[in-house]
C-alpha cells in the first residue's frame, strides 16, 4: 500500500509538489527540534526571494529610482508579510518544533513562520531551480504586487534616520546589541542607537534584532526632529 504524503494539502496551497518530501520536512524543521534544521535553507531562500522580488520591481516600475525600489522590496519581504503568507498556507500546523517552542507557542511566532517560508523557497530552488521557483514566488506575492503604489510606500525608521543625518552631513548611526534576555526560543533584544547630536544612545527592544534597531532609530529620529 502506498503511503500518503502528509504534505499533499500544502502542495496545493503553495503551488509546488516536492519530488523529495524530506526536503520540505527539512524546511519546516526548527533548530529546537533537530540538529539538522532549516537555517541554511532559510539563508538561501532569503537571498532568492530578495532577488526575485527585486527583478520584478525593476521591470514593473521602470521609472522608479533605486531608493524607492529598495523600500518597496523591503515592504514586501519583511518578516511581518512573510508571516502572514505562512499563515495563509497554514505552515504553523506543520512546523517541527522542540518541546520548549511547542510549549511557548512557537508555531504562532512571526519570526519562526517567516523563516520557515524562506526555507521553503530555498528548498524549491534546490529542487526545481530558478525557472520553477520564480513563478511560484511571484504567484504568492501577486496580490501584494498588484496593490503596490510607489507614492504610498513609506520609509522605515532606520531609513528616515539615515537620510536625516545624511542631509545634515552627520555621521551615520551606530547600532549595538546591548543585551539579550530570555531563552533561545523567546529572546528579547535590546539595541542601542548612537547618533551625533544626542547626549546618550536611544534603546530599542524587540523579539528580533531588526525590530529592536527600528525602534531605537525611531526614538533617535523623533528626538533629533524635536530638538531641531
Image (cartoon, rainbow, N blue to C red):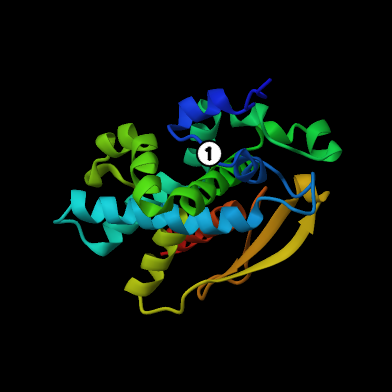
Question: Whole-percent x and y of residue 166?
Answer: 36, 73
Instruction: Reply above or below: 221 against 24.
Output: below
Do we see residue 155 in this rendering? Answer: no
Q: Quadrant of residue 110?
A: top right
Query: In which quadrant is the C terminus drawn?
Result: bottom left
Q: How many other residues sit within 10 Å of disc 1, few (<14), some (14-19) or many (≥20)? A: some
User: Residue at coordinates 44% horizontally, 56% vertically from top-left?
Assistant: 48
Residue at point 46%, 51% (across, down): 125
Q: Quadrant of residue 204?
A: bottom right
Measuring from the top left, give residue 153's x and y in whole percent.
31, 46
Q: Left or right: 77 with respect to 123?
A: left
Q: Nearer the viewer, residue 87 or 162?
A: 87
Asked whether, in this view, residue 157 is left or right of residue 139, the answer is: right
Q: Which type of secondary structure does the marked residue at label 1 adopt?
A: loop
Q: Residue furthest top?
A: 1
100 to 43, vertically: above or below: above
- Judge whether residue 7 can be spotted in this image: yes
* Residue 59 at x, y percent in the picture: 20, 53
Vertical side of 112 occupied by 86: above or below: above
Compared across the picture, whether 216 is left or right of 168 comes to right
Residue 205: x percent and y percent?
66, 52
Location of mark 1 (residue): 18
82 or 124: nearer the eye?
A: 124
Residue drawn at (68%, 35%), measured in percent from left and top? 95
Residue at the spot 33% in from the left edge and 50% down from the top edge: 72
Q: Quadrant of the N terminus?
A: top right
Amino acid at each position: 500500500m502506498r503511503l500518503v504524503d502528509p504534505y499533499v494539502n500544502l502542495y496545493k496551497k503553495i503551488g509546488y509538489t516536492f519530488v523529495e518530501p524530506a526536503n520540505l520536512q527539512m524546511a519546516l524543521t526548527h533548530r529546537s527540534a533537530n540538529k539538522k534544521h532549516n537555517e541554511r535553507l532559510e539563508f538561501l531562500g532569503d537571498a532568492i526571494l530578495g532577488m526575485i522580488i527585486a527583478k520584478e520591481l525593476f521591470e514593473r516600475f521602470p521609472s522608479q529610482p533605486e531608493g524607492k525600489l529598495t523600500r518597496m522590496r523591503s515592504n514586501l519581504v519583511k518578516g511581518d508579510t512573510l508571516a502572514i503568507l505562512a499563515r495563509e498556507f497554514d505552515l504553523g500546523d506543520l512546523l517541527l518544533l522542540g518541546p520548549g517552542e511547542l510549549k511557548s507557542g512557537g508555531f504562532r511566532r512571526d519570526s519562526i513562520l517567516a523563516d520557515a517560508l524562506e526555507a521553503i523557497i530555498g528548498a524549491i530552488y534546490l529542487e526545481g531551480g530558478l525557472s520553477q521557483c520564480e513563478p511560484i514566488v511571484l504567484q504568492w506575492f501577486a496580490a501584494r504586487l498588484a496593490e503596490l503604489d510607489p507614492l504610498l510606500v513609506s520609509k522605515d525608521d532606520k531609513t528616515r534616520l539615515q537620510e536625516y543625518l545624511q542631509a545634515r552631513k552627520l555621521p551615520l548611526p551606530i547600532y549595538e546589541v546591548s543585551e539579550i534576555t530570555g531563552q533561545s526560543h523567546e529572546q528579547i533584544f535590546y539595541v542601542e542607537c548612537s547618533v551625533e547630536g544626542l547626549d546618550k544612545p536611544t534603546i530599542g527592544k524587540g523579539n528580533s534584532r531588526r525590530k529592536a534597531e527600528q525602534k531605537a532609530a525611531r526614538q533617535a529620529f523623533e528626538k533629533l526632529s524635536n530638538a531641531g
